[in-house]
Image: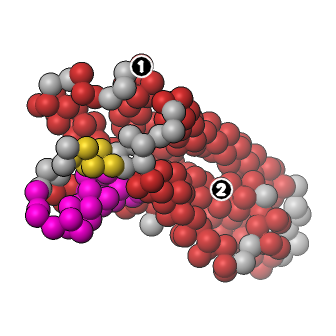
Amino acid sequence: MLTIAFNGLETTSVIGTWIICLLFETKAIVAVASYSSIFGLVVITVERYVRIVHPVIHRNHYHRWMTYAGVILPWVDGVCCYLIPAWATAAMVDGKCIRFIKWPTPAMHSAYTLIMFVWHYVVPPAFFFFAYYSIIGVIRRQNLVVPANVDTIPFTSARCSTQQASRVGHGQKKRQSQMNAVRTMITIVVCFCICYLPCKCSLLYFFLLTPSLSILPALLQFTYYHSFHLICYLNMCLGNQNST
């Protein structure tokens, strides 16, 4: 909303003009938040993959600083992948702030666009598929193995039977909780893939096949940009809400 409100706002101050340009007209705030949200899903998936698929490694090598790193790294990704390139290539042309214009060659801009598409839309879903496929396989194997082991253990007393049943029930409850968390994350991932598809594909098309969106009428540019990105931002809010 702030980006829409400040977009096109004019001021007589040179410093104020550049502040509005760098923060809002380059879409820096919303883009960094969007990139960070995508990378945040990857970080959460990595943690759950290691915890469930490789529990011994997680138990022996996990440290508290890794949690803080997992919070900071998504924002580092957003700053490095969007903020720095956008600010470094932004320029004022006839009093208008234009992002990604001061590239040494057009090929560099095309390469940057393609790399960002692969890094933020192709690689994450591929890793999500691999990770959750492995996680679901481990949980299902645990559900099959544990009841079979329980049936082969002789119960020498009622007390032993009660303790064993309690441990089995606790293990089943834990695995059910893990499966519920996995289902939630899979839902978020599917929503991510669907919501980001039109935005990412259209941006890839326009930036690789045409120099900009200037071939479109102004109203269509506004509708195109904000409608597709609104879907992305709603998905970003959904993902952040359900992954906490």
User: What mark, if any, has residue 209 been given in the picture?
Assistant: 1
Q: Quadrant of the C terminus?
A: bottom left
Queried whether the magenta region covers residue 46, the answer comes back as no
User: Is 114 left, or right, of 60 in this rendering?
Assistant: left
Callout 2 crowding tier (Cα within 10 Å): few <14, some 14–19, many ≥20: some
Q: Measuring 28% from the left and 28% from the top, which residue is drawn there?
A: 213
- Span shown in magenta: 10-33
Q: Disc 2 marks which amino acid?
A: Val
Mark 1: amino acid: Leu
- One can see residue 35 in this view: no
Few, some or many C-alpha atoms within 10 Å of disc 1 (few <14, some 14-19, many ≥20)?
Answer: few
| Side (left or right) of 89 relative to 73 | left
Task: Name the residue tied to disc 2.
Answer: 46
Quarter of the figure that contains the N terminus: bottom left
Dot 1 or dot 2: first in sequence order is 2
Say above or below: 126 vs 57. above
Please provide percent x and percent y for residue 78.
Answer: 48, 57
